[in-house]
Amino acid sequence: MNDDIRLLDSSVVIRHFRQGGEISSRLAALSERYLPSIALGELYDGAYRSARPAKHLAQIDEFLGGVTLVNVDDETAKYYAQISASLAAKGQPIPLNDMWIAACAMHLGLTVATTDAHYQRIDGLNHEMW
């Protein structure tokens, strides 16, 4: 696992947009940044629901220039199913999109950078609280 490569949860990107500062510095220090298409959908959803969609869409477009977009495939779907079944068996569900984001990370062997503590519930997931 490379210490300067992360798969980004939308929570980190949103905090970067809103607050900048330390989180923006941490993002800038990464040699590679991966963004799951699911997280991109969450960002677009937030932009379209906001009072200033044009501003937020422009932020997203600019941000996309510095990340590698990760799409879901059949292997990712297998990880998603394993995560979902495991969390259901433990009675500890998390949001569906976050299970997909975790599945992307596990499939690619990446660490998820997030501000959401519920990623701790996923066995075998490398995650880092930002």
Image (cartoon, helix red, strand yellow):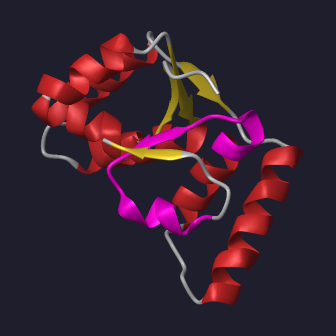
Q: Nearer the viewer, residue 31 or 37?
A: 31
Q: Is residue 56 left or right of residue 126?
A: left
User: Which residue occupies the foreground of this view, 102 or 72?
Assistant: 102
Left or right for 74, reference 121? right
- Residue at 69%, 51% in the rendered image: 103
- In the drawing, does residue 57 fall left or right of residue 78? left
Q: Is residue 122 left or right of residue 11?
A: right
Asked if 71 appears above or below 67 in the picture, the reply is: below
Q: Is residue 120 magenta?
A: yes
Q: Residue 37 location in percent, x, y?
A: 58, 37
User: For the magenta stretch, what is the residue range?
Assistant: 105-122
Res 107 → quadrant: top right
Which quadrant of the rendered structure holds the C terminus? top left
Q: Nearer the viewer, residue 97 or 60?
A: 97
Quadrant in the rendering for residue 61? top left
Q: Is residue 10 magenta?
A: no
Residue 58, how many percent across, how many down? 28, 20
In the image, residue 70 sits, relative to residue 72, either above or below, namely above
Task: Note whether 49 is above or below 92 in the view shown.
Answer: above
Q: Could you tell me which residue is drawn at 49 percent across and 18 percent down?
A: 4
User: Against 86, is 12 above or below?
Assistant: above
Q: Residue at x 31, y 47 (%)?
A: 46
Please indicate, yes or no, whether residue 3 appears anywhere in the rendered image: yes
Q: Quadrant of the N terminus?
A: top right
- Residue 76, position in %: x, y? 78, 47
Residue 62 seen by the camera: no
Q: Position of residue 30 (x, y in %)?
A: 42, 15
